[in-house]
Amino acid sequence: MANHEFATDPSEAKDRNFVTALARGLDVLRCFRANESALTNTDFSERTGLPKATVSRLTHTLCELDYLVVDPRTGTYRLGAGVLQLGFGVLTSMEIGDRAGEEMKALRDGPNSYITVAIGEPYRLDVVYVCTKRSREDVALQMRVGSRLPLFDSAIGRAIMVGMDDVMRERSFAIAAQTDPELEARGRASYAAAVTEFAEKGFCSSYGDWRPDVNGIAVPVFSPNGSIVYGLNIGGPAFHVKKKQLETVYAKRLIKAAEAISIRY
């Protein structure tokens, strides 16, 4: 089965109020990955699973609306100013970053100068960083606002899954199942392990699961009405950030910080 990682969830299209054409246009915009500046209609077609003729109409429309810019010489497209305007609108509305800044800085400025702190929000099968406090060292995780981590394999993703309600969590598993049944199975296993760990320790961990050279622990953070769940993560290069220190020195600080952020938020 083809892996159309940016395709719309088929279950969404069954909603009578769901606008499929709009969803397909957004699927095209989501095709850009980190460090990719230009894509072709063939790239869009392969990643969304849409026919090339459909993709051509979508990219033409997105260019007309300034969400894409086409290079006629190469036939490639890059993101336009319209997307940037949307991004600024999202970033300016993210009050949690402002409210969490003090607590995040305190965690980052703790005894280990290699620690990076971040808050992330779930998006499909990823966690997107919405606020970061980078390590005080030059050798640090290259993670910034907008960076993505896998929901099932990262500490922050596992913490978010623990904090999700059943509907949100099952939706994530459904998206995984559409991508690859084995991915769904892995996600459910990861969640089950995360629930056990969170019950025992009060946090979720990833020691080399996401990347072999990265260790991290995370906890969920909630909006006042519980409708939004974020993850608060601390971690760093495995050579400098050890499991023992994370669990004996930083875990209590992390849990207290999450409680404070949830109250302020």
Image: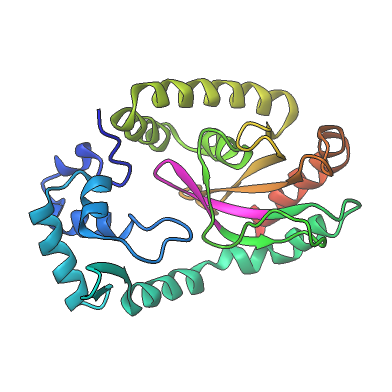
Q: Is residue 73 visible?
A: yes
Residue with the most extreme left position: 53
What residue do we see at 67% from left, 56% from top? Answer: 261
Q: In front: 53, or 94?
A: 53
**Does any portion of residue 265 appear in the rendered image?**
no
Main SS, magenta region, reads strand
Give the quarter of the figure containing the N terminus. top left
Q: How many marks?
A: 0
Q: Determine whether 42 is above or below 238 in the image.
A: below
Q: Does 50 lie within the magenta span?
A: no
Q: Which residue is rendered at x = 71% and y = 39% of the image?
A: 213
Quadrant of residue 21 within the rendered picture: bottom left
Position in image of residue 20 (x %, y %): 14, 52
Q: Position of residue 80 (x, y in %)?
A: 32, 75
Query: Which residue is at a point 42% across and 74% down the rendered structure image?
Result: 89
In the current view of this chain or complex, which residue is farthest to the right?
A: 111
**Left or right: 38 in relation to 232:** left
Seen from this angle, which residue lies furthest front? Answer: 73
Bounds of the magenta segment? 118-129
Q: Position of residue 59 (x, y in %)?
A: 18, 65
Image height of 240 relative to 184, above or below: below
Q: Is residue 237 above or below residue 119?
A: above
